[in-house]
């Protein structure tokens, strides 16, 4: 497979590179905005889990340029700087990071909080879904501190077994909660975005940073686990009809007539965790098992005598009758 | 809720789960394994058998088990009963099990306690348990009555990725928490002044540059080990962690895994780690790797346990397999490599070739033409003979068989072959075969009766010599039996040979990569039907420039059947006949299973080989009935087991280009090679096998993308299916005739698997895997289901034809035959025969005028398949296969000659988006032709209906002619389109109604269901229009309903069971029944299942007593059952 094969399989990956976005996710935010006019009248935004920064790029274009416009971007990972974007490196689920973010909005609340956070998936679905939910809840917790009344919150969700619990949680704080899927997000992906409009915390609610917001649990009185009363919010597909289909493989020369030219990735990851391991591997320095012959090559006379073979051996590898080892070969 | 009973019916119950194994623990001689919410108990004691003894069902409800903590017994008697805390996700339950006298019973279980947050670790503190929770807090819990006693958070509130609790009382309880910021935080919950008051961390430890996934503390040595996303394991000297303020020193930083490390465990003298690379490593505490266990498939090893007394390591994988390894593994087994010290003043000359006669006699020939023998019992070199005609060039091959039959053969550059009895070298026999170089030598042995030696000479001529011995053993006879001629090629010689049982044919491989079939006794051979194939001059160009005079001798008998260039330019390396099949291996890194039918080599099934082993050198059957593959990977010689995916032996020999030999007898396996002018010998006692055990076979290593039930095999009482479990577990009604459902699954791991699911035991047997695909397999379709003896003969068993398709626009067609076999553990034998394959880009590559066409994108994925079977009145016209393609096309392929020919017939780009589903059905109405209708659905939520019967009619105008000859036809426009959903359609099904209409149901990514009634109306025939005008049916929608929020995620499985009942499955892990036929579909009930990311579902009725079965495939497989 050549370097263009990903360009063929993923049209948005390719378009992102061609348009200078750091990640294909930029199109998700743009398509969400198309549907919900997220940026209308918005001046102050928090971009949680922002690296490598394509959402921040969109935000800095749409919001950052305005007077009093402010974009605060937060991520665990380092991120290349962007004009008009304040960056914080830290874990959004950690108390100290949350405090730092809130400082930027004291006295002048944010209009919009977005979170595109995703854990590095482990492949164990229940762990991944839990970790994803914790990012959303941490973002929600931060939002309850910085968001103005009536403000908007958009966060990535994994639509797995317990997503309905998150919906019921979000409904507590917002007058409208929808589940939206931009066309640039694949059919095969379980990701979607909770679009929560009209921030309206319950009466008497006091934001508290020191306690994490925990997920709801199924209310057994209402049989929410497998009954008909699960909270499933309306689903909206975003992006106009002419939008490219992210599941479709496209030829390199798109229909708009433009000539294809390979573009290298915009922003390679900054110091990923596996960097050292890869360097060692490349130089052949990963530890290897000692093969018997590497211990030292025996001279014949020193050939070790076999130890007594434990009985277990026969148990595990069933013995098969000796097939004629001593029968004399070929009689005429 | 007045009609409650009505709402509850039918209720699905889980029968079988195959999920990643995420929890393992050894207790005495038992192994506890978590599978979904169930606990499996295996017996590990020597006296008994290694087997599963009990499944304790549904311990954790809808949670999955991630770990077990056995309550320590002060009196130390865990051999009769144990209290086990079972936890996973947010759930915790205690069970008390007694297991005296090999009888296992559940004595008591607590309630299922739901925590507010994720449980990372559990520790028994006398009668209570401490829990380390997701946001860095610790809870003291009374697990019997289910109440929280203490709840202490850390001041440093953050999400954790792992935690480890230490200490036996609340007072001394210590938590080591792995934060998402990669730090370790050590703190003491009991230092909280009041309940709920946060405690500050005592120590923060940095080091890893990725998240920490697992920790293990060894109290006796004061060591802590951590495993991380950064692919390393660190060993820390921590002393007694229960003492605050101690020094933490990183004493080891171990890089050995090539991906993230999921698990780590410290033992008294070892450290074990396992990860995403599917490797389990055994380290010394000093950080040296002592062992590497490879064998799991897919996304890694998720759980490890150790039985220290027996020195066993047990691993559980994402592939749902469980394996047991010997910690000190090869200690007694491999004897390692020894140099045989050939070089000596008394033995002049340099070694040219080496071979093995049995596993204890080495033969070597020098450039002085001297043949030497080394006997491992005597341990010294002995010269057998010297013949200067073999000076400059000499081939050397020992005969096969346990002792190499006491024979070896030499060949030289002048056409001379010498057969040498090893014990009496003076009785050697010379044969002058050719006037040029002998290119290769190989043996073929039939039982103990017939031994042939094949020698390739110039011009592709292969001389076949018959070798026999006098009864005294003192003399041998060599007689030329016949000559064969290889197909022309540049390097025209054979490389290997074997008798095809019963012995009428020889199978050979050649340097050009072809596998050939020759009659073993040409004098007796009467070619059936086909004219005799003695090759004429025209067919045999004088490639070797054979002397014209002896033309008759130079030519020989051509192959009666050939698979040309099967293994590519690098050549075939071995052919082996076993169990009715022929196996061939090649330098192209693949091996194939072939079949001879009617004197012809049949299409092939490619078999999976070891990753990275790009030179497969041979294949052997080992005494336990399994097969091993020999090959080279870079500098290493590897013996690999395809059954366990394990590298049984690794010898760092420098590669396969020098002379080498392999021999395997039951007593020992030996591998000899030349290096630095000496013979090196690797020996391992006990043959090839290693005593590692597969406690449970894995299934697919990656997500299952499609599940399809083929049919049911009924076994008579003589085939009593062995029950894995004690009789007390068997459910009532599970006796009776053995019904075994045959189900196909395909996966992103590029394989198709044939599974047997007996209705009696709740177990699954993988019968065969088809590994021909080069990319992920996404869709399956089955047709032509029958019985092995044909319709007249009701023999038990099943036959079917299968098409599979997936990534890289690749499609394969094969046939399947399942028959009873009392000797197999599953009681079934499964034969798969590959029939044909198709790749869009290859198809394109063959087109003449391709420069004028748009190249088909080779990245196209096939998303779904449907079989469209026409009436039987069109002979030779096999069924059509419709494929939903990611490049926006619906393609129709024609299968002919029972699947042996597969070609692209027509296509349409109507949808312009990725097509996700295709489904076909027939419309039958009185006095009308049966009509085939195809429905396709795309990512934009539309369904399109196509009338295939009209399209396929001869002279039909519906099928537009291709733009260029050789290109597919165009499939016109659909009869009807329906905008059913706002986005992608992930499931589709139809059912005819009693009124003669069709119920159509679809489910979407947006969680919605769409159900409507489709009517097919035929316009009145109008005489006036004459016959030219075809009658085209009109499709219309009669009643249409939508259920917007039926599920919270993609609806990926949907089946209309009857006009009044439908079942749907979704990625939200609910299996939901819907009532149909009274207006809107209404919710009846739903069940939470355990398989995440379900991609497909199949349902079928089994029997009136058993009811329905339903298989869900995703990241695992789960089978449900309900009574009708
Ligand atoms: C899908 S990427 C976001 C892409 C980004 N919106 C863009 O457009 O470039 C998800 C990000 O979440 C971040 N993340 C995951 N867990 C986090 C945490 N606990 N705190 C902060 N960031 C986190 C990851 O580092 C990753 O960069």
Image: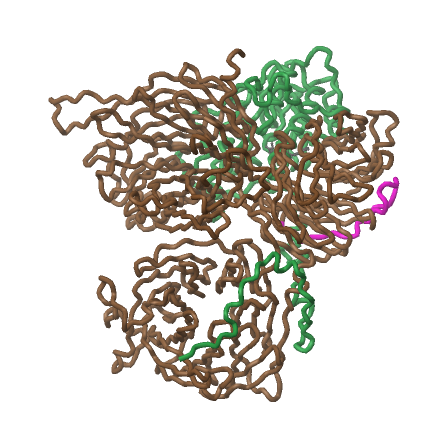
Residue B812 percent location from the top left of the image? 38, 46
Q: Residue at x 35, y 20 (%)?
A: B1013
Task: Point out the quarter of the image occupied by ligand 1.
Answer: top right
Residue at image location 53% in from the left, 76% down from the top: B354
Q: Colour of chain A?
A: green
Locate the N terminus of chain B and report the quarter of the image it occupies.
top right
Q: From the viewer's perspective, is B62 left or right of B1050?
A: right
- A46 and B822: which one is in front? B822
Whether residue B142 is visible: yes
**Numbered range of the magenta stretch:** B237-258
Give whichever of B482, B1124 is nearer the camera: B1124
Q: Nearer the viewer, residue B651 or A248?
A: B651
Q: Is residue B240 magenta?
A: yes
Q: Decide whether residue B1115 is among the magenta residues.
A: no
Where does residue B400 sit, x and y in percent of width and height? 47, 72
Q: Quadrant of residue A178?
A: top right
Query: Which chain did the image draw in brown?
Result: B
């Amino acid at each position: 497979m050549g370097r263009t094969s990903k360009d063929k399989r993923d049209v948005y990956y390719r378009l992102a590179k061609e348009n200078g976005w750091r990640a294909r996710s930029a199109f998700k935010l743009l398509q969400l905005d198309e549907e919900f006019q997220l940026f209308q009248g918005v001046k102050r935004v928090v971009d949680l889990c922002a690296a490598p920064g394509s959402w921040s790029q969109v935000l800095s274009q749409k919001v950052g340029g305005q007077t009093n416009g402010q974009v605060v971007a937060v991520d665990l990972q380092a991120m290349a700087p962007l004009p008009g974007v304040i960056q914080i490196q830290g874990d959004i689920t950690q108390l100290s990071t949350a405090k730092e973010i809130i400082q930027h909005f004291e006295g002048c609340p944010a209009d919009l909080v977005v979170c595109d956070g995703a854990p590095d998936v482990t492949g164990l679905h229940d762990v991944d879904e839990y970790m994803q939910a914790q990012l959303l809840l941490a973002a929600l917790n931060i939002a309850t501190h910085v968001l103005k009344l009536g403000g908007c919150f958009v966060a990535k969700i994994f639509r797995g077994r317990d997503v309905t619990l998150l919906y019921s949680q979000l409904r507590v704080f917002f007058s409208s909660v929808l589940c939206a899927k931009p066309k640039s997000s694949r059919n095969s992906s379980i990701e979607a975005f909770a679009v929560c409009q009209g921030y309206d915390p319950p009466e008497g609610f006091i934001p508290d940073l020191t306690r994490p917001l925990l997920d709801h649990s199924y209310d057994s009185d209402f049989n929410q686990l497998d009954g008909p009363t699960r909270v499933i919010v309306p689903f909206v597909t975003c992006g106009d009809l002419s939008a490219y289909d992210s599941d479709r493989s496209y030829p390199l020369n798109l229909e708009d007539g433009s000539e294809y030219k390979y573009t290298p990735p915009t922003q390679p990851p900054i110091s990923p965790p596996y960097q050292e391991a890869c360097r060692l591997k490349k130089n052949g320095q990963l530890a290897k098992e000692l093969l018997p012959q590497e211990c030292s090559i025996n001279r014949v006379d020193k050939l070790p005598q076999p130890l007594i073979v434990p009985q277990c051996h026969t148990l595990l590898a069933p013995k098969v009758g000796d097939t004629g080892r001593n029968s004399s070969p070929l009689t005429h | 809720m007045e009609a409650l009973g009505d709402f509850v019916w039918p209720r699905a119950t889980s029968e079988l789960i195959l999920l990643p194994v995420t929890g393992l623990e050894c207790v005495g001689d038992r192994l506890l394994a978590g599978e979904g919410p169930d606990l499996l108990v295996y017996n590990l004691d020597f006296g008994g058998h290694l087997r599963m003894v009990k499944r304790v069902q549904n311990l954790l409800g809808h949670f999955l088990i991630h770990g077990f903590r056995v309550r320590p017994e002060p009196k130390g008697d865990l051999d009769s009963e144990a209290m086990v805390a079972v936890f996973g996700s947010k759930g915790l339950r205690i069970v008390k099990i007694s297991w005296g006298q090999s009888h296992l019973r559940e004595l008591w279980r607590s309630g299922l306690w739901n925590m507010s947050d994720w449980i990372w670790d559990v520790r028994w503190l006398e009668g209570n348990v401490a829990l380390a929770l997701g946001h860095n807090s610790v809870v003291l819990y009374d697990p019997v009555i289910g109440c929280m006693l203490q709840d202490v958070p850390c001041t440093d509130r953050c999400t954790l990725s792992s935690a480890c609790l230490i200490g036996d009382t609340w007072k001394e309880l210590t938590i080591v928490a792995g934060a998402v910021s990669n730090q370790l935080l050590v703190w003491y919950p009991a230092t909280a002044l009041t309940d709920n008051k946060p405690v500050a961390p005592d120590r923060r430890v940095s080091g890893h540059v990725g998240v920490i996934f697992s920790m293990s503390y060894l109290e006796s040595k004061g060591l802590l080990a951590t495993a991380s996303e950064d692919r390393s394991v660190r060993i820390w000297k921590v002393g007694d962690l229960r003492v605050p303020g101690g020094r933490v020193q990183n004493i080891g930083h171990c890089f050995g895994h090539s991906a993230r490390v999921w698990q780590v465990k410290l033992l008294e003298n070892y450290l074990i780690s396992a990860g995403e690379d599917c490797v389990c490593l055994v380290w010394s505490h000093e950080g040296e790797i002592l062992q590497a266990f490879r064998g799991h498939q897919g996304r890694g090893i998720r759980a490890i346990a150790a039985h220290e007394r027996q020195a066993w390591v047990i691993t559980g994988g994402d592939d749902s397999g469980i394996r047991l390894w010997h910690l000190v593994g090869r200690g007694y087994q491999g004897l390692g490599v020894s140099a045989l010290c050939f070089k000596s003043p008394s033995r002049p000359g340099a070694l040219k070739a080496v071979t093995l006669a049995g596993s204890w006699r080495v033969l070597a020939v020098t450039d002085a033409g001297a043949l030497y023998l080394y006997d491992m019992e005597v341990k010294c070199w002995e010269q057998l003979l010297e013949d200067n005609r073999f000076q400059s060039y000499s081939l050397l091959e020992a005969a096969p068989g346990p002792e190499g039959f006491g024979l070896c053969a030499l060949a030289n550059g002048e056409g001379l072959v010498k057969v040498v009895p090893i014990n009496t070298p003076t009785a050697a026999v010379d044969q002058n075969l050719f006037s040029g170089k002998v290119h290769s030598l190989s043996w073929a042995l039939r039982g103990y009766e017939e031994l042939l030696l094949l020698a390739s000479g110039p011009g592709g001529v292969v001389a076949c010599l018959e070798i026999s011995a006098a009864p005294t053993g003192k003399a041998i006879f060599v007689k030329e039996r016949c000559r064969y001629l290889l197909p022309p090629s540049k390097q025209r010689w054979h490389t290997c040979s074997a008798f095809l049982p019963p012995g009428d044919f020889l199978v050979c491989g050649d340097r050009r990569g072809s596998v050939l079939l020759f009659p073993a006794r040409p004098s007796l051979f009467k070619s059936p039907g086909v004219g005799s194939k003695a090759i004429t001059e025209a067919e045999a160009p004088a490639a070797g420039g054979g002397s014209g005079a002896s033309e008759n001798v130079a030519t020989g008998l051509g192959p009666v059947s050939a698979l040309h260039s099967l293994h590519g330019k690098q050549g075939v390396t071995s052919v082996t006949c076993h169990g009715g099949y022929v196996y061939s291996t090649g330098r192209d890194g693949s091996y194939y299973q072939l079949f001879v039918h009617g004197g012809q080599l049949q299409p092939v099934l490619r078999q999976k080989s070891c990753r990275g082993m790009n030179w497969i050198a041979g294949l052997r059957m080992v005494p336990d009935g399994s097969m091993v593959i020999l090959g080279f990977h870079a500098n290493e010689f590897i013996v690999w087991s395809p059954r366990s995916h394990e590298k049984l032996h690794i010898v760092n020999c420098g590669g396969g280009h020098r002379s080498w030999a392999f021999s395997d007898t039951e007593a020992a396996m030996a591998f000899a090679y030349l290096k630095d002018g000496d013979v090196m010998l690797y020996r391992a006692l006990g043959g090839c096998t290693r005593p590692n055990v597969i406690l449970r076979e894995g299934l697919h290593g990656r997500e299952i993308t499609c599940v399809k039930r083929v049919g049911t095999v009924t076994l008579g009482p003589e085939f009593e299916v062995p029950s894995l479990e004690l009789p007390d577990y068997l459910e009532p009604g599970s006796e009776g005739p053995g019904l075994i459902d045959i189900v196909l699954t395909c996966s992103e791991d590029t394989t198709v698997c044939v599974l047997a699911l007996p209705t009696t035991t709740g177990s699954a047997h993988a019968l065969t895997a088809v590994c021909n695909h080069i990319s992920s397999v996404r869709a399956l379709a089955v047709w032509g289901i029958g019985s092995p003896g044909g319709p007249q003969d009701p023999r038990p068993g099943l036959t079917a034809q299968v098409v599979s398709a997936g990534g890289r626009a690749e499609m394969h067609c094969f046939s399947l035959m399942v028959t009873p076999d009392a000797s197999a553990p599953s009681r079934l034998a499964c034969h798969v025969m590959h029939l044909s394959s198709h790749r869009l880009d290859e198809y394109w590559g063959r087109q003449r005028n391709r420069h004028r066409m748009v190249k088909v994108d080779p990245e196209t994925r096939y998303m779904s398949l449907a079989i469209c079977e026409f009436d039987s009145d069109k002979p030779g016209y096999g069924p059509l296969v419709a494929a939903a393609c990611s490049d926006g096309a619906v393609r129709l392929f024609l299968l002919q000659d029972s699947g042996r020919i597969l070609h692209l017939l027509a296509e349409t780009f109507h949808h312009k988006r990725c097509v996700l589903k295709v489904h076909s059905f027939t419309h039958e109405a009185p006095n009308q032709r049966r009509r085939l209708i195809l429905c396709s659905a795309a990512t934009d939520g539309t369904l399109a209906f196509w009338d295939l019967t009209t399209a396929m009619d001869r002279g039909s105008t519906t099928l537009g002619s291709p733009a260029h000859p050789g290109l597919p036809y165009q499939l016109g426009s659909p009869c009807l389109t329906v905008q059913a959903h706002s986005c992608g359609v992930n499931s589709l099904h139809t059912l005819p109604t009693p009124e003669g209409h069709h119920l159509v149901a679809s489910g979407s990514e947006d969680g919605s269901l769409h159900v409507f009634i489709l009517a097919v109306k035929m316009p009145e025939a109008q005489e006036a229009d004459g016959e030219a005008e075809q009658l085209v049916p009109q499709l219309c929608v009669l009643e249409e309903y939508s259920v917007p929020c039926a599920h919270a995620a993609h609806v990926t499985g949907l089946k209309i069971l009857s006009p009044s009942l439908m079942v749907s499955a979704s990625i939200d892990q609910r299996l939901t029944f819907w009532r149909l036929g009274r207006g809107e579909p209404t919710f009846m009930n739903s069940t939470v299942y355990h398989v995440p990311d379900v991609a497909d579902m199949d349902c079928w009725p089994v029997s009136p007593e058993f009811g329905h079965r339903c298989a869900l495939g995703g990241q695992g497989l789960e089978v449900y059952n309900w009574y009708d």
